[in-house]
Image: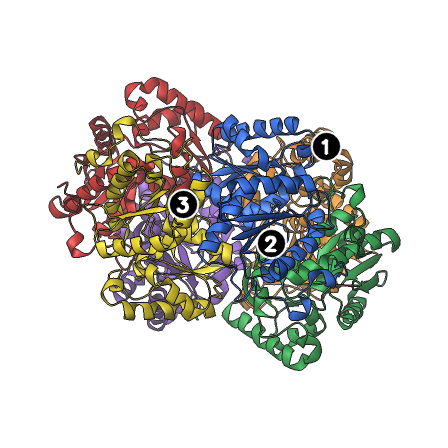
Chain colours: A orange, B purple, C red, D yellow, E blue, F green
Amino acid sequence: MRIKIINPNTTQSFTDALQKLADKVARPDTDILAVSPASGPASIESFYDEALSVPGVLEEIAKGDREENIDAYVLACFGDPGLYAARELTDKPVLGIAEAAFHMAVLSGACFSVVTTAPRVRFMTEHLVSRYGFGEQCKKIRTTPMRVLDLANSPDEAIAKVVAECVRAREEDHAEAIVLGCAGMSQYREYIEQEIGIPVIDGTVAAVKLCEAMVDMKLGTSKVLTFNWPRPEMAHPGRQLNIA
Amino acid sequence: MRIKIINPNTTQSFTDALQKLADKVARPDTDILAVSPASGPASIESFYDEALSVPGVLEEIAKGDREENIDAYVLACFGDPGLYAARELTDKPVLGIAEAAFHMAVLSGACFSVVTTAPRVRFMTEHLVSRYGFGEQCKKIRTTPMRVLDLANSPDEAIAKVVAECVRAREEDHAEAIVLGCAGMSQYREYIEQEIGIPVIDGTVAAVKLCEAMVDMKLGTSKVLTFNWPRPEMAHPGRQLNIA
Amino acid sequence: MRIKIINPNTTQSFTDALQKLADKVARPDTDILAVSPASGPASIESFYDEALSVPGVLEEIAKGDREENIDAYVLACFGDPGLYAARELTDKPVLGIAEAAFHMAVLSGACFSVVTTAPRVRFMTEHLVSRYGFGEQCKKIRTTPMRVLDLANSPDEAIAKVVAECVRAREEDHAEAIVLGCAGMSQYREYIEQEIGIPVIDGTVAAVKLCEAMVDMKLGTSKVLTFNWPRPEMAHPGRQLNIA
Amino acid sequence: MRIKIINPNTTQSFTDALQKLADKVARPDTDILAVSPASGPASIESFYDEALSVPGVLEEIAKGDREENIDAYVLACFGDPGLYAARELTDKPVLGIAEAAFHMAVLSGACFSVVTTAPRVRFMTEHLVSRYGFGEQCKKIRTTPMRVLDLANSPDEAIAKVVAECVRAREEDHAEAIVLGCAGMSQYREYIEQEIGIPVIDGTVAAVKLCEAMVDMKLGTSKVLTFNWPRPEMAHPGRQLNIA
Amino acid sequence: MRIKIINPNTTQSFTDALQKLADKVARPDTDILAVSPASGPASIESFYDEALSVPGVLEEIAKGDREENIDAYVLACFGDPGLYAARELTDKPVLGIAEAAFHMAVLSGACFSVVTTAPRVRFMTEHLVSRYGFGEQCKKIRTTPMRVLDLANSPDEAIAKVVAECVRAREEDHAEAIVLGCAGMSQYREYIEQEIGIPVIDGTVAAVKLCEAMVDMKLGTSKVLTFNWPRPEMAHPGRQLNIA
Amino acid sequence: MRIKIINPNTTQSFTDALQKLADKVARPDTDILAVSPASGPASIESFYDEALSVPGVLEEIAKGDREENIDAYVLACFGDPGLYAARELTDKPVLGIAEAAFHMAVLSGACFSVVTTAPRVRFMTEHLVSRYGFGEQCKKIRTTPMRVLDLANSPDEAIAKVVAECVRAREEDHAEAIVLGCAGMSQYREYIEQEIGIPVIDGTVAAVKLCEAMVDMKLGTSKVLTFNWPRPEMAHPGRQLNIA
C-alpha cells in the first residue's frame, strides 16, 4: 500500500527526517511518500501558521487521489491542520499525528501527558485533546521554552529540555505514557523513551501504523454526511485560491 | 468607530445584505465596512469551504489594520472560519458571528437552539458550541433540508422551512431563544421572531454590538500568549500563498 | 436609555463609586442610576449574605419597571445574587456582573483567571463559572486573604494583594485575561491592567456595555418559559415579606 | 433526635401532610417538627418564589438552633431553596429534598428520571441535577402540565398525570428509579410505586433518613470554609430585613 | 435488621476491626455480620486483586440471601469491587464503601479530597469518582507512600502519613471534608478527624448507616433492567468457577 | 507475531467463528490463537456474567505469557471484562474489543452509534463509552430485543433486527459509522455494512489490527504505575481461587 505523509510546513529537512523515520517503521509492503507543499509557512507554531498551511495540504490530498494512487494520508504536524477539510476531499483514511498519538497512548498507559514546544501552542493543544475526547486521560500539556526550528538548529539542547519535561510529567503528573507534541521530535523518540523509562509515542509513527490497519480493514473516511465530497466546482483547492 | 464585516464567501449579494443590515443596527457614530475576499468559495457549507476561505479572511484583516483604520472585525460566517488565526494578526477585537450569537442568546433566555442550513454542518456547529462552552445551554442543533444559496434563490420557501424548525425548537426542545445558524438568514431575523414569539438572535447584529461594546471598553485581543503576533516574515498572509 | 445598577449591599460608598465608574464608560445617551436597597447586608461574602440581599434587589427591579422607566438592569455583586429571580420580574435585560465579565473575557483572551476576595467565596464562584459554561476557559479562581470592606478601608494594601495574585495568574495559570471578582475592585481596574499588562475585565463595566448592546438590539429577557412573569399575587416582592 | 422539616411555602396543608408522612418513616426515637415560615409564597414554582421563601427558611433555621434543640434540618421544597445559606447558619446537617432524593435514587437503580410539576421548573431542576453531579445518572426531567396547588385541589387528576409520566420514564428513558420532583407528591409515593413497579423516591422521606444517618455519625455541616458562620452582626436573618 | 459487611480480602484482622467498628455505629436493632471470603487476595491494591476478589464477594452475597436472612450488604473495600455484579444477585441494597463515603461527604462539606494508600490506586479511584458523578466535588485524590498492610503492621507510622496528607488536602486543595480511601483506615477515623479539624468520612460507617436508611425506606436494588437477576443456571457463582 | 484472542465465554462456536474471522483479516505473518476459558458463563450479558468470566480470562493471559509466546491479547467480549486486571498481568498489549472499535470508528466518521444486544447492557455500554472518552462522539447506544445466543440460534432473524437498528442510527442519530456491540455479530459485519452503506466496525477485527500496529511499534502496556505487575504471590490467578 502507499501512504502519503504530508508535512504541512516547507522545511525540507523535517520532511526528509519523516521519510526516513516512516520507512523504518512501515511494513515491507508499505510504500511511504513524504512531501511538503510548494508554499506555506516554514514552521507551524500558531493558529495563523496552521491556517496558511492548509491550502497546501489540501492540494497534496487532491494530487494524491488524482495522480499518486495513495491509500491513506498522514498530516504530520501536531495541530492536525486541515484534518476535517482533508477528509472531505478523499474517501481514503486521513489521520492527524496528534489524534493518532493520543489513540495509541491510551492503549498503552492509563493516562498520558503531552510534551510540546513553545508555550503559545498550549491552547491549540488543549483544543485537540478536548475535541478528540481525551480530556480525562491527558493529565497535562507541558510546553518547553523553545521554538520548533530549535529542534533542527540545536537539537541536543532542545532534546535535553524535552527529556527534563518528560521526567516532570512522569513524576508530577503521574503520566504513564508521553505523547511528543511536535513532528520535529519524531527522530528522538527512542532516545527519549530510554531516558525516561515509560512509553513515548510519536504521532507520525502512530499514524502510519493506524493507516496500515485501516487500509487492511478497508476502512476509509465515512462519506455519508460531514465528510461528504465538496461541491464539484470546488474540487481543485489551489484553483480556488489561484495558487495552482 | 469603524467596524469591518468580512463575509468569508464571495457572494456579493450576501455582503450587500450584511452592509445594509449592519448599517441599521450600528450606532450613529459607527461606520460599517462590509467586504468579501477577492477569491474563495461562493458559499461555506463544509470544513473544506471554510479552509479555503480563511486566507482571504486573513488578507482582509491585514489590510484592515494596515490601510483602513479599523477598530474591530466581524467574521460573518456561522462557522467562525479562521477566528483564532485572525486574532493573531491584530490586537483589535475579532468576533465570529456564531460565538457572538451564543453569548447574546444566553443573556436573554435560559437556553437556546440553533436553526441552521444543510445537515452536513451539524458536526461543525457542535464543535463551536462545545469549544465555546455552550454545551449545556444549547438544547439542539436543528438543520434544515436546504443549501446556503437557497436563501438567495428562493427565500420564501427557505425561510418557511426555517420558521417551521424554529417552532419545533420552541415546542420540542423547550428552547427559550433561537440562534440563526447562517449569515444568509440575517435579513429575515425580525420576521422569524414575529412568527415564533421568542427572541431570535442573528450573529452579525450580535457581533456588531459586541464590537461596539469592546471598543468602548478599550478591550482588544489579548496578545500575551496564544494570540501573539505572527513571526515578522509571516505578516502578509497572501504572500505566503502567492495570492497577493 | 436608562440603566439601573443595583448594588445589592447597603454600603453607599460602593454604590457611589459604581455610579462614577459607570458614568465614565456609558455612552453619552445612556443614563446610569446606581442604587442600593433600603435594607440588607453591608457586604456580600457568603451564600447567606446573598440570600438576604435578594429581596432588596427584587424590590429595586420592581420599582425600576413600575416607576423609573428603566431599560436594563445590572446586578453589581460578583455572585450575581437573585439573577434568575430578577429576570422573572421584568422583560428588560438583567445582567449579573460575573456573567458579564466572563462573557467579555473570553472574547478577548483564550482563557482567563478570576481574582477575587476572601477564600470562602471560592465555591460560590466555581458554581457561577460552571453554571454559565466557562469551566474550560476559566483556568483558576484565585482568592486573596482579605475581606470585601478592606477594599474601602485600606485600598492600597488590598490592591497590592490583588496585583500580586494577578501576576501569579498570568505566570502560573497562563491566564490571558483577568476577571476581577468583586464590584469593590472596579475603580482600580485600569491601574491593575497597567501593572500586569494583560486585559483586566471589570464586571460592572462589562455589564453596562452589554446592556447597551442588548437594548440597541431590542433583546430583552425571554419570557416564554423559565423567566415567565410571577403569579399576579406575587408581583410585589416586598409585600410578600412585609418589608415594603 | 429532633429533625425539623421546613416547608418553605406557607400552605399549611402541605406542612401537615409532611408531618404525617415523616412521622411514619422516622425511627421511634426521632422527633419530627414540620413548620412553614410566617410569610412567603403560597407555593414555589419559580426562581422568584424561591428567592422570597429563603428569608423565612433562614429564620426557621436560626430559631431551630436557638430555641428548639434541633439536630438536623430538612428543606422540603424540591428546588432546595436557600440550602447553602442555611448551612452557614448552623453546624447541624441541613438537607434539601432534591439532593436527598438524587442520592438515594442512584443507590437503588442504575439511573433515574425526575417527574415534576409545571414545565417552567425544568431549567431549575437541571441546575440542581448538574450542580450536585447527577448529570449522567439522571436520564430525563419530565414535567407535567399542572401547578403545584393542583396536587392539593384535584389530587386524583394530578396523580394520574404523574403516573402516566412515570410510565414514560420507565419505557422511553429506561429509567430504573423515579424521583418525585415536588414535596406535594410525597403522600402519593407508595401508590405511584405500586402502579409503575420500579422504586419511587420521595425526597422528604430520603432527607429524613439521611438526617438520621448523619446525626448517628455525628456528621454535621463542615464549617471550615464555605459554610463558615455568618459575621456576628448578621446572625438574625429576619432583623436584617426587618421582618422579625 | 441484619447487615452483612463483606471484606473482599482474606485478612481476618481487618474483618474483625470492621465488625467492631460497625457494632459501635449501628443502631441497637441492627445486627452486623462481618465476613471475608474463603479464598482471594490478602489485600486489594490493584485491578487484578479486585478481579480475583469478586467471585468470593458474590458467593457471600448468594449465601446471604440464601441462608443468612440479610437485609443489606456492604462491600468493605474502597474500590467497590463487584458492586454492580452483586446488585444483580440480590434485590436487597448493596453499597460500596467508596460510593457511600462520597455521598456522605458532599452532604457535609462543599467539596472533599480522598486520602488513600499506594499511588497505583489513583487511576482506579479516579474511575470511581467520575463514574459516580463526584468529579467536580472531589478536589484531589491523594495517595500516600504505603501499602495497605502497613496499616496493620506499623499503624502509627502509616497513620502519621495519612494525617500529613489530610492537612495538605485542607490547606492546598481547600477540601472541606476528607474521605478515607481504604477500609484499613476505618478504625483511625476519629483520631484523624481530631487532628485535622474537619469532617473525616469512613466508608464502612457511611455504608452501614445508608443501609439502615434504605432498609427503613424499603428501598432495595431496582431489578427492572440493569440489575435484573442472573439467568437461573448462573445463580451459584462459585459453581460457575468450580470453587464452591 | 502471535495474537491470542480470548473469548471470555465458553461457547466454542463463537470462539471458532472468531478464529476464522481473525485469520481472514490478520497479516500473513500474524498467527491467531482463539480460545475460551475452561470454565465461566456461556454468554456474557450482565455485570455478573462479566465478573465470573474474568478469572478465566486472567488464566489465559498468564498462560499466554508463560507458555505460548504471545505478543498481544484481545479480549473478545464487548464489555471488555477484566481489561485493566489483564494489563497488570503482562507487559504485552491487551485490547478490549469495545475500546478498539470506538477508536477505529472515530478515525473514520465524525460520530458513531453502537448497536448491541439486549437492553440490560445499555448501562454497561454507557460506562465504557464514557470511561474511554467517547461521550461526545457516540451519538446513541441502541439495544435490540434479543439475547446474545440468538445470534447463534436464529441468526437471520437476529441480524435483521440489527440491520433495522443500524438504519435508525444512520437516519435518526445521524451516525456516520456503526460499532457492533457484541462479538457474536462479528461474522455479519460485511453483510450489515453493505445493507446500510456506512462503515460498520467490528471490535475483534479492530483489536487484531491495533495489536499488530502496537507490536510493530514495540508499544506494550506501560508498567510504571497503574498496570504494574501483581505482587509475586499473586501471579497465578487460578490458584488464588483454587480453580487451576
Asked which secondary structure carries label 2, the reply is helix
Q: Is residue E184 above or below residue A91?
A: above
- Residue at image mark 1: A155
The 10 Å Cα crowd at callout 2, few under 14, some 14 to 19, many 20 or more, is many
Asked which secondary structure carries label 1, the reply is helix
Foreground mark, 2 or 1, reads 2
- Residue at image mark 2: E83
x and y percentages locating residue A10 in the rendered image: 66, 44
Asked which secondary structure carries label 3, the reply is helix
Check contact, mark 2 vs mark 3: CB within 8 A. no
Foreground mark, 1 or 3, reads 3
- Residue at image mark 3: D211
**Does any portion of residue C241 appear in the rendered image?**
yes
x and y percentages locating residue D35 in the rendered image: 26, 47
x and y percentages locating residue A157 in the rendered image: 71, 28
Question: Looking at numbered disc 2 in the image, what kind of residue is underneath it?
Answer: Leu
**Does any portion of residue E6 appear in the rendered image?**
no
Quarter that holds the C terminus of chain E = bottom right
Q: Is residue A155 above or below residue C239?
A: above
Same chain assignment for discs 1 and 3: no
Q: Residue furthest front?
A: E28
* Frontmost residue, C212 versus E170: E170
